[in-house]
Image (cartoon, grey):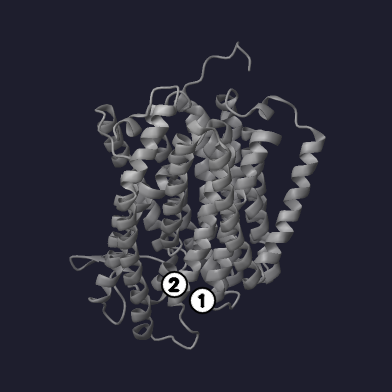
Amino acid sequence: MSTALPPVSQTRSFSTVFLIEMWERFGFYGMQVLMVTYMVKKLGFGDSSSNLIWGAAAALIYATPALGGVIGDKLLGTRRTMLVGAVVLAFGYALLWVPTENAMFLYVALGVIVVGNGFFKPNAGNLVRKIYEGDEVRIDSAFTIYYMAVNVGSTVSMLLTPWIRDYVGEHYGDSLGWHTAFGVCSIGLLLGLGNYMLMHRTLSHIGSPPDEKPVSLRNASIVLAASLITVAVSAFILQSESVARACVYGAGVVILGIFIHLIRSSERSERSGLSAALVLTIQTIFFFIFYQQMSTSLNLFAQRNVDLSFDLFGFHLMTWIPEQFQSLNAIWIVILSPVLVFIYNYFGDRGKNFSVASKFAWGFVAVAAGFFMYGVGSNTAVDAKISSWFMVWGYGLYSLGELLVSGLGLAMIARYVPARMGGFMMGAYYVAVGVSQYLGSVVANFAAIPSDITDPRLSLPIYTALFNKLGFVGLGCTVIALAVLPMMKKLSTTHALSQQHTPLPAVHSEE
């Protein structure tokens, strides 16, 4: 790093990561919002197969960051690996732009996206951690705003790509409509890369040791070979439900074993923090089972049993495309994130912040209430279709829960995990998320509608039965989260006392 360069503020460095993350999520969610209905409506897959294929893809997308974190830490560098990931993702979305309905081509394109996300996701999060090292008072707020970047990008894309699909499909043909919408996701990544090139100097002093050295040919060859193998393996896994199931469950067992090994082999002063991270990661797995309903059961529910018209006091406001309801999650998170940041800072400045574990408990309460909202809506359904407003409020409660659980998942790793394990543990966290995404698709299939059922009066009770059960499971998760609070308090206090630096306010208040 040249000393001639003026110092860069944390805010400017954070803004660079924030913006490329926003564009990356624009591409990912623009693709995700269409994928299940693309398989159902365009490729002719059943509900069950579409849910499980996307669940397996989501599991792989979230699992590969475990390796991407290691590559960033040890081989290519954190900054460099994040940038490579963005390029690979742009290529993956561009493959979906190709107008073909060949299923294997879809699996290969998803395999490329799996690799790109593996490079990008853990290293972008780890850069945020590095930016705020030594200034951990604001780490909850920083990661909450970072999480909001996900939802700024996804809000726009989840509203835009279904509209583009319908508009282009109406004027130029249905097939071109689907693939043009996917192509927009690639264009979003290219815009993000251009923006990063303009702002990259703000991160020149942030990264891991390999960022400061030229890339060795050996390391680059290893990464390239591993990437090509991963694409091929991913495509193979996606084309077989039994292989996908075995791989996902096996990954869950492996990551749990790694967690336990790290706890047992780490220094005594590090064990309490790693144990706390393990407990909260398990709770996060339960949350993402709920989360996966957005792109599976809730998405298909909107196709069949939601009135697409928004009316208020007898006046028609607008009509949405079914897939666009998924954007409600992102819209609510953009609205709620600044509110939670204000609350965190207000109580943190007064030494009265809530513990991460208690936020998890409140998050499950909100998720449960959100799913019960859809069940309540079914009681007032007209022609077996519930009002769009029940979707708005259901997603609002569910999104509050997401911010309290998933939004703090990254902050949890940054708080409790030793810095030397940062990249790997960030990746391990995403593996856990991937396992739960697949489990969420399995759960969604309890409401898979047989192809011979087209009457919404028959599908409505199937969906609402699932949502009500998920509401009760959410309440059960709340009870469990409250039950482990005393243990989490003890682990957090032990972790705080073992650190050389001043404990974080959120941990200190638990003493």
- The kind of secondary structure element at disc 2 is helix
Q: Which residue corresponds to the image point at 31% horizontal and 81% vertical from the top-left?
A: 384
Tell me the tag on residue 47: 1
The kind of secondary structure element at disc 1 is: helix
Image location (x, y in percent) of residue 134: 46, 23
Residue flagged by tag 1: what amino acid is it? Answer: Asp
- The CA span between labels 2 and 1 is 8 Å
Q: Nearer the viewer, residue 326 or 307?
A: 326
Q: Residue at 71% of width from left, 60% of height from top?
A: 233
First in sequence, mark 2 or 1: give its number.
1
- Which quarter of the figure is the C terminus placed in? top left
Horizontal relation, residue 17 to residue 407: left or right: right
Taking the view exactly as shown, the residue that stands out farthest to the left is: 313
Question: What's the amino acid at mark 2?
Answer: Leu
Question: Local crowd at mark 1 within 10 Å, few (<14), some, or many (≥20)?
Answer: many
In the image, residue 347 above or below residue 250: above
Measuring 46% from the left and 62% from the top, which residue is drawn there?
Answer: 292
Task: Name the mark on residue 275.
Answer: none
4 vs 497, nearest the viewer: 497
Q: Residue visible at 77% across and 39% down?
A: 220
* Residue 444 position (above or below residue 503): below
Q: Position of residue 300 (x, y in %)?
A: 44, 72
- Residue 147 image point, x, y percent: 43, 43
Foreground residue among 167 and 295: 295
Local crowd size for mark 2, using a 10 Å CA cut-off: few (<14), some (14–19), many (≥20): many
Disc on res. 300:
2
Where is residue 109 shown, x and y percent of the image? 67, 60
Q: Are marks 2 and 1 in contact (CB under 8 Å)?
A: yes
Residue 121 is at least partly visible in this image: no
